[in-house]
Amino acid sequence: MSRGSWMAPLALLAALVSGSLAADLAGRYVSLGKCPDITNKADFDAVPYLGRWYEQERYDSDFQIGMDCVNAIYSDMGNGYVEVHNTARTSEGDFAEAIGEAHVVEPGVLLVQFGGYPAEYHVLATDYENYSSVYNCFEEGEYRWQYAWLLTRAQFPSADLLATARQAFADNGIDLDSFHVTYQGDDCPYLP
């Protein structure tokens, strides 16, 4: 296994950037309506964002079914780029990983690429040391396809910290009722 890195919270965002529109849309949380008018973290800085993040909650998506122990490590590649190393455990107990890269394209927005296919990663809020609230949305006709990830630095965060991270989604009009809790435990196969 290669050493890890930075960005989208899964070995799975690869589905978001899967090449064809049909495949891209199939992996997201789908609902009627328009994408909310979100506010990205205007003063986002990628440097303190580097390091390990644990996925605590997310929208369910086809490419993450049965996955737990989701983890991302972000590391500096130089020239403004960050390596994104996502890992997870599958429902069969196998270790899954994906490596990509990202760079800031506007305040609070990173362009993440796995296999050459780009996707936007909107950081709604982060304090860099404890939590990050990340979102992506795409509209097609009357429907919207969404990704959302609540990430923390701690494997076992406090309820207060989770509430703070969840508030960033609520403040942006993002429905929290469909969030899925991601298992993180002592038996998870994390990279060192």
Image (cartoon, rainbow, N blue to C red):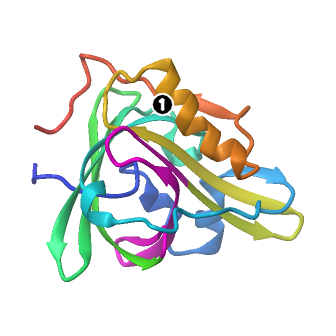
Q: Label 1: which residue? A: 66
Q: Position of residue 147 (x, y in %)?
A: 59, 52
The answer to whether residue 19 is above or below residue 9 is: below
Question: Which residue does the image show at 51% across and 29% down from the upper left?
Answer: 162
Question: Which residue does the image show at 25% across and 68% down from the upper left?
Answer: 82
Q: Which of 182 and 163 is in front in this view?
A: 163
Q: Does the magenta stretch include residue 122?
A: yes
The answer to whether residue 91 is above or below residue 45 is: above
Q: In which quarter of the image is the C terminus?
A: top left
Q: Where is residue 71 in the image (x, y as percent from the top left)?
A: 32, 40
Total marks shown come to: 1
The answer to which quarter of the image holds residue 135 is bottom right
Instruction: Give the side of residue 130 with respect to residue 16, left or right.
Output: left
Q: Nearer the viewer, residue 68 or 136?
A: 136
Please provide the residue range marked out in magenta: 107-134
Q: Nearer the viewer, residue 189 or 166?
A: 166
Look at label 1 and name its amino acid: Gly
Q: Does the magenta stretch include residue 166?
A: no
Question: Which residue does the image show at 51% across and 23% down from the upper left?
Answer: 160
Q: Where is residue 186 in the image (x, y as percent from the top left)?
A: 24, 16
Label 1 SS: loop
Residue 181 visible within the image: no
Instruction: Give the side of residue 163 with respect to residue 92, left or right.
Output: right
Question: Which residue does the image show at 75% across and 42% down from the upper left?
Answer: 175
Q: Where is residue 22 in the image (x, y as percent from the top left)?
A: 65, 68
